[in-house]
Amino acid sequence: DAKTTQPPSMDCAEGRAANLPCNHSTISGNEYVYWYRQIHSQGPQYIIHGLKNNETNEMASLIITEDRKSSTLILPHATLRDTAVYYCIVRVAPNFGNEKLTFGTGTRLTIIP
Amino acid sequence: ETGVTQSPTHLIKTRGQQVTLRCSSQSGHNTVSWYQQALGQGPQFIFQYYREEENGRGNFPPRFSGLQFPNYSSELNVNALELDDSALYLCASSRQGEQYFGPGTRLLVL
């Protein structure tokens, strides 16, 4: 799986958009970008994933650059409950039990009241 | 709530002892993965089970072993506990898609 690079920490004001960057310059053509987050003392929670098109769901939006070497997770209206460690993970499509995730150290996002 | 449960929530053991951690997967999920998360680090992949067979293993010694049962629930066993085994142990269930994590078992080895 390709390696990812994320800033160790970020702050964002409550109600503003939180933009979390991720670099994955060695990503292969068949690898997806996944985002998970981990709120203190809980298990990681799936947020969103994409291959090359931008994706949006009820939690967030994922913007992947055209060369796929970087991406940005956007939380459109951050709340205090979004304070967590956010992990960007690059992986091949899961299949037949090959569903390993390789976590880095992530970005600690703090939402400021 | 992901539907993935783990037991116990907390556990204290001493060096050299053995421990068994349990995980009930979400309904319909046939793959269970186990992760170890040391304080301040991201989760590290231990191994995963698919249809009761080990199917992939991370860089963990053989004293870390597991089982998956016909109902897809799973156990993680750790023998000869060491101080460095103190961590949060997470299980995740999946079925060719996103992994859903349980709340974890926090193990302290003294």
Image (spheres, coloured by chain):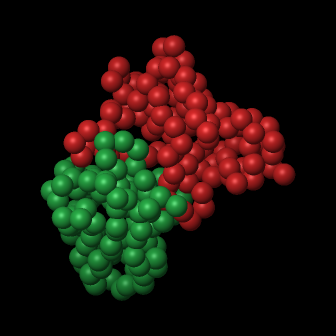
Chain colours: A red, B green
Q: Determine whether, in the image, residue A104 is placed left or right of residue A54.
A: left
Residue that lies at the very extreme toward the front in this rendered image: B28
Left or right: B84, with A12 as reference point: left
Q: Is residue A93 visible?
A: yes
Up-down relation of residue B90 to residue A4 (above or below): below
Which residue is found at the position 18% from the left and 64% from the top? B70
Outermost residue to the right: A113
Image quarter (top left, top right, bottom left or bottom right) of the N terminus of chain A: top left
Determine whether, in the image, residue B68 is placed left or right of residue A76.
left
Establish if B95 lies above or below B81.
Answer: above
Residue at 63% in and 48% down: A108
Query: Where, by quadrant of the figure, is residue A3 drawn?
Result: top left
Taking A37 as reference, is B92 above or below it?
Answer: below
**Residue B12 location in percent, x, y?**
42, 84
Relative depth, front residue between A17 and A86? A17
x%, y% of residue B100?
A: 43, 53
